[in-house]
Image: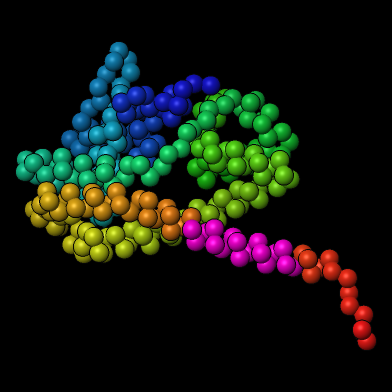
Amino acid sequence: MGSQGEQDGRSAGGRYRRDDVARAAGVKVRNLRYYQERGLLPPPRREGRVAWYSDDHLTRLRLISDLLGRGYSVNGIAELLNAWEQGGGLSQLLGLERAMTRDWEHEEPVTLTAAEMRDLFGPAATAEDTRRAAELGYLWIDGDRITHRSRRLLEATLALVRQGVPLAEILDAGDFVQDQAAALADRFVGLFRQHVIGPDGLVGPDGTERLSATQLDHISEAAAALRPVASEVVAAEFARAMARRVEAEVAELLRAQAPERRTGQ
């Protein structure tokens, strides 16, 4: 098994191969060349035959995707990025994006061969389970090599399988948890957007209205403060809900095992 940097396609210093930066940004590989041709994305740095993309490329790709999602055209985004660069605001905005999106995930990917994965799960795993796990984003499959995005989640899945829980039902639960986590994230981000960033967003429709450096710094600090708060709130509420649910389940089991009371006693 390779090092962690090799496993997630990134080496020390935040360097990504083409496929890995596209996957991390959630875009198609062919879009990289298209964005470069349209002036939206700087070219990668080449070492021999390998093109290396950086964290700055990843940040800009995410910004492009966000602007596309907001209805901007590719030409409009190019003009907007150029205006920000001319005005010196692009580096601030890219820095803000990095500050707001970093440090949310601390997962160690695990790369195994297909045979090693079969040895781990045995007959509990089927081809359909593998397909579904990839569909849910837990696995990346490259020929005979399978990368699970999180060692913690892989080990938790194995623990449940070894206790007799069917893998298909674990994946059902994972699908449910992803939906609930997305809803929670939407709620926290909505609060942040409304009360910290404000209703006008970062820029006006024409790209001329930008927040000051002081305001951008404030938003970065608020995003850093949100990370532990959001995690602690969710963890505390889940622990409380589990305690109540397990207590109720234990009480029900005890009632079911208690001898029936005889009438007249």
Residue shown at 42%/39% (left/top)? 106
Which stretch did the figure color magenta? 236-252
Is residue 157 covered in magenta? Answer: no
> Could you tell whether 45 is left or right of 149 in the image?
left
Main secondary-structure element of the magenta-colored stretch: helix
Which quarter of the picture shows residue 120? top right
Depth order, front residue of 72/47? 47
> Does the rendering let one see residue 108?
yes
The residue at the far left in this view is: 87
The residue at the far top in this view is: 48
Task: Give the percent coordinates (x, y) of residue 171.
Answer: 60, 48
> Could you tell whether 192 is left or right of 115 in the image?
left
Up-down relation of residue 243 to residue 127 (above or below): below
Up-down relation of residue 216 to residue 21 (above or below): below
Question: Which quadrant: the C terminus?
Answer: bottom right
Depth order, front residue of 247/36? 247
> Does the rendering let one see residue 79?
no
Residue shown at 47%/33% (left/top)? 108
Task: Give the percent coordinates (x, y) of residue 254.
Answer: 78, 66
